[in-house]
Structures are given as structure tokens and as C-alpha cells.
Amino acid sequence: MLDEQRNKRGGSPVPYWSVDSLETAREMLLGAGCIHHRGPLDVGDGRKIAQVVDPFGNIIGIDGY
């Protein structure tokens, strides 16, 4: 799903890491200095995705349940 305000068309790709628990991974990343960017979004079958921005400005996606 394209979000022109947060992820401009033609911008850098967002890598997604598969995780067992999205909320656990998200809280760990936020606690390590990342900031909230997008989500969590329900993508079906109980799976969710979210994005954070690391301290260097990179967007990181996480994908899990």
C-alpha cells in the first residue's frame, strides 16, 4: 500500500524483518532508539506489519503476528 506522505514513490525500499511477535520486536526497537513511523497495520490472517525509523534515518519494517 503506497503512502505518499511517509514513503515517497521512487524512494528507498523498506526491508522487512520477519518476527515471531510484532509487538515484542516493535517495543525492542523503540527502546533501542528507533521512532514510530507507521502501523501496526493488519495485512490479513492475523499478520501485521509496522515500520520504525532508526537513529540514522533508515526505515525498517517488521512483519509478524
Image (spheres, rainbow, N blue to C red):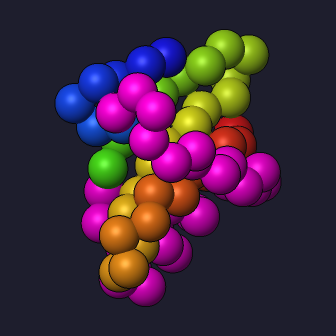
- Front residue (pair 57, 39): 57
Residue at 30 percent across and 56 percent down: it is 36
**x and y percentages locating residue 26 in the rendered image:** 50, 61
Describe residue 55's horizontal placement relative to residue 43 as left or right: left
Relative vertical location of residue 41 with respect to residue 33 in this rendering, above or below: above
* Residue 11 part of the magenta segment: yes
Residue furthest toward the front?
A: 10
Q: Which residue is painted at 30% across and 66% down in the image?
A: 35
> Could one spot residue 30 in this view of the protein?
no
Relative to 58, is 59 above or below? above
Q: Do we see residue 9 in this rendering?
A: yes
Q: From the viewer's perspective, tell me whether residue 35 is left or right of residue 31.
A: left
* Quadrant occupied by the C terminus: top right
What range is drawn magenta here?
8-36
Q: Is residue 27 magenta?
A: yes
Q: Residue at image x 74%, y 16%?
A: 45
Residue 25 percent coordinates (x, y): 59, 64
Residue lying farthest to the bottom in this orientation: 32
Label total for image: 0
Residue projecting furthest to the left? 5
Considering depth in this image, is 16 or 56 the residue closer to the camera?
A: 56
Does residue 11 appear to the left or right of 6 in the view shown? right
Q: Is residue 15 above or below residue 25?
A: above
Query: For residue 57, what is the image quadrant?
Result: bottom left
> Residue at position x 51%, y 48% from top?
12
Residue 14, given in percent of the width and then of the height, sits at 57, 47
